[in-house]
Amino acid sequence: MPIPSGAAGAARTLLRDQAFRALRAAIVDGTLEPCERLVDAEICEWLGVSRTPVREAIARLEQIGLVQVRAGSSTTVSPLDVRATAEAQAVAAAMHELAAREAVPVLAVTDLDAMTAANATFAAALAAGDVDAAIAADDAFHGVLVRVSGNRRLTSVLDDVTPLLRRAERVRFGSLTGRASVAQHARIVELARTGDAEGAARANRENWLTLRPE
């Protein structure tokens, strides 16, 4: 028999992924607040998609700990959970340590310059109290090491745990406690520039472990 076209499946996957990204972003940036109830019909109307991709997206959000689903009852945004954040932090710190260890030996000058520029943007965003810009700059800084490491498994794990940390980081980067990261970032670049992969890896890990859930 002829093989069925995969177009319909691909379209469904695309809608599911779009719904997942939109809901994840709304939860992380606080648009959807902790413990807020999620109603399928309202989400479908907001995103302009059917119920199926919405439910698939919610199932994925439940897996990574951003929503809580009570069968036959309700779906709500997960509350800020100190233990869950601490667990995600430990995993993220280990992954970023590995990223630095693998990336530093092959970093180009342009990569180091990109990290320095991202840290400058990060510092300016903190000074201006722009939490969204600070988080984006922090992503850009650490993203260089993740990208250069070329480790797809590492990237996959970070995709799951990082959103849990972003909600806590919004609190941290909105306060003076986030300012210490600027110097920590500079130290990571300094170690990387000298080719000290182990030192940069440890410093990168320590940077992620400075996040303290509120």
Image: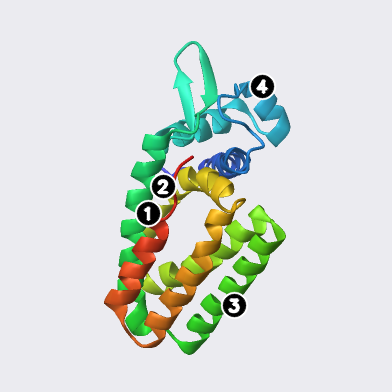
Residue corresponding to mark 1 = 92
Residue corresponding to mark 2 = 161
As measured in the structure, the alpha-carbon distance from the residue carrying label 2 to the one carrying label 1 is 7 Å
Q: Earlier in the sequence, mark 3 or mark 4?
A: 4
Q: In the image shown, does 203 or 139 lie closer to the viewer?
A: 203
Residue corresponding to mark 3 = 117
Q: Which of marks 1 and 4 is nearer the N terminus?
A: 4
As measured in the structure, the alpha-carbon distance from the residue carrying label 1 to the one carrying label 3 is 23 Å
As measured in the structure, the alpha-carbon distance from the residue carrying label 3 to the one carrying label 4 is 43 Å
- In the drawing, does residue 165 fall left or right of residue 15? left
- The residue sitting at 41% across, 58% down in the picture is 208
Whether label 2 touches label 1, CB < 8 Å: yes
As measured in the structure, the alpha-carbon distance from the residue carrying label 2 to the one carrying label 4 is 28 Å
Q: Earlier in the sequence, mark 2 or mark 4?
A: 4
Residue corresponding to mark 4 = 41
Does the rendering let one see residue 68? yes
Q: Check disc 2 and give the amino acid type.
A: Val
Q: In the image shown, does 138 or 187 lie closer to the viewer?
A: 187
Q: Which of marks 2 and 3 is nearer the N terminus?
A: 3
Question: Residue extending furthest front?
Answer: 176
Whether label 1 touches label 4, CB < 8 Å: no
* Disc 2 secondary structure class: helix
Whether label 2 touches label 4, CB < 8 Å: no
The quarter of the picture where residue 206 lies is: bottom left
Q: Which mark is residue 15?
A: none
